[in-house]
Amino acid sequence: MCGIVGYIGHRDAYPIIIKGLQRLEYRGYDSAGIALYDGNEINLSKTKGKVEDLNNKAKSTISLEGKLGIGHTRWATHGVPNDVNSHPHYSNSGDLVIIHNGIIENYDAIKKELTKRGYTFSSETDTEVLVNLIEEVKRKEGVKLGKAVQIALNEVVGAYAIAVFDKQKPDEIVVAKLGSPLAIGVGENEFFIASDASPFIEFTNNAIYLEDEEMAVIRLGKEIKLRKIKNDAIAYPSIQELALNLEEIEKGGFDHFMLKEIYEQPRAILDTYRGRLLAKEGIIKMAGIDDNLEKFLNANRIIIVACGTSWHAGLVAEYIFEDLARIPVEVEYASEFRYRNPVITDKDVLIAISQSGETADTLAAIKLAKEKGAFVFGVCNVVGSSIARETDAGAYTHAGPEIGVASTKAFTTQITVLTLLALKLAKEKGVFDNRRFHEHLSELENIPSKVEKALLSNPLVEIISNVYKDSTNCLYLGRGYNFPVALEGALKLKEISYIHAEGYPAAEMKHGPIALIDEHMPVVVIATNKGHYEKVVSNIQEIKSRKGKIIAVVTEGDVQVKELADHVIEIPETLESLTPLLTTIPLQLLSYHIAVMRGCNVDQPRNLAKSVTVE
């Protein structure tokens, strides 16, 4: 959530910052702002609304000159979304300007103390408190900006990524990080600052990712100075070469990023198992597993922690690990796990799943598990992210950038990685014979082409979407491996169309949700020919007898469900454990088309953020 962009160098800062903020819109926000320094004064513009609203306002109200500037997209925490609470924020003197992601938990106590010392505040934000604390430290201690930032951050409690500059020193920006990502792009006598690399990828492919509790003083014509905030120790920056390219973060002819990413899934799944899955040789190669195989084989249980869509992928993995590898699994919401005093031992393996690799609750769960001696394995998409650095080992999904807030290819690629892991453990434990192992590897290798075939249902799904676009409620039902897919389908519909939807195990329908079913209630039922097919058919008959509208996802060639359902969407046949990779496709398309028909902002649904970096 929230987005930071900054520039200092020889170019005009304004177009770089505005375009950078547009690239970060996927993170979720409700207001935006920019501050530019032209050598004489700071020109600041901010507004509730979108970056385009900011662009229009800034062009008509402030000078756009300046080679130094910072910009921000804000997701409201302290204070409602409005122009005043938007970032950047001035200090009382007007010399310091700051942008900030995260939450300062003890801001109220600091604010009261600063008020006693004569400081005044125009906003409700914790960020304005922080910039004035930095100013007070700078004035009282007689130190430079960098030192003042360091001292001030040692007095605050919370999470932050900040960028701050002093108009008295127009060749310098100070940045710092704890719990919220921050990258520095390094060019030829110019520097870029952003929440991720997408705002500056067209200018440089060299980046420094700050670690937690690190700060950097960025000066033109000098090397970046990195220090540890707590003890002032020198840190040595590691410049990474970015693999991201500009085409990956553009829409590529699609109307929305979400639709583009739905259609990217065949390639994303292939990229995820490329080099890892050698089906003909009967080999799965994963360094993070190979190097720590005994940890998994000797584990008493696997604990999976995640949030949102990643939690649903973890639920699918629970079925996969227990069914294929015969290892006990518990799946936990990371946000609950960290607070319920869980029993963790050094015989446990914890798998943390996160698309961004920055999810705050999941990171906290990782730290707790490591304190208890558990082995921690990460599954994430973003190279160099916090989870990738905090875990003992892990595997990247290689899904490519996911810009749409509602995850699609993250879900299927996470399931792909977890399936590879389960299959490898099943083989090593002797649960699988060679014939069964080769069958699963061969079928997984064929999944990308089967996803392509599942995507051919798009025109039919669009027709169905038009029928139900005005519904106020929807029920999703699945059994076994496809119960988590029902949860995920309901989440997608809620996220982007704002229709209330619930996912349930099909057998639980009669224990409550059946009371909701009438002629106005669409019910999406996942009814593949694997697993509990006859039981699901019975559930469909119960819905039909109560006049519910049935949208069924079935295996191609199905006859029985076609006679009962109002609408049938076919997917290719596959092994039961791999069906979630196919059944989720029409549900993603259904939520997408309904949201578009309802006029919703598909890529940036209200109140949501792509990466939740605070509690």
Image: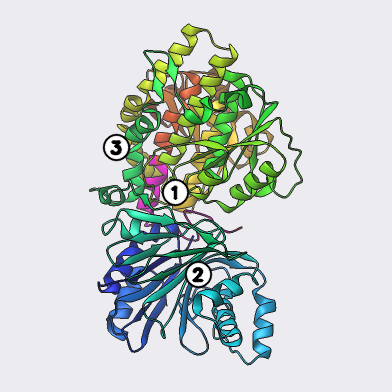
Q: Is residue 347 shown above or below 188? A: above
The residue where tag 1 is placed is 406
The reply to whether the magenta stretch includes residue 595 is: yes
Q: Which is in the foreground here, disc 1 or disc 2?
A: 2
Residue 516 position, x and y percent, is 60, 42
Residue at left offset 34%, top offset 76%? 68
Residue 383 position, x and y percent, is 43, 45
Do we see residue 201 in this rendering? yes
Q: Which is in the foreground here, disc 2 or disc 3?
A: 2
Q: Is residue 494 shown above or below 162? A: above
Q: Which residues are magenta?
A: 589-614
Residue 391 position, x and y percent, is 57, 41
The residue where tag 3 is placed is 459
**What is the distance, in whole Å, between disc 1 and disc 2 at their CAs?**
24 Å
The residue where tag 2 is placed is 100
Q: Is residue 466 shown above or below 19? A: above
**Amino acid beneath label 2:** His
Dominant secondary structure of the residues highlighted in magenta in the image: loop
**Amino acid beneath label 3:** Pro
Tell me which colouring the rendered structure shows: rainbow
The reply to whether dot 1 and dot 3 touch (C-beta < 8 Å) is no
Q: Is residue 588 shown above or below 143? A: above
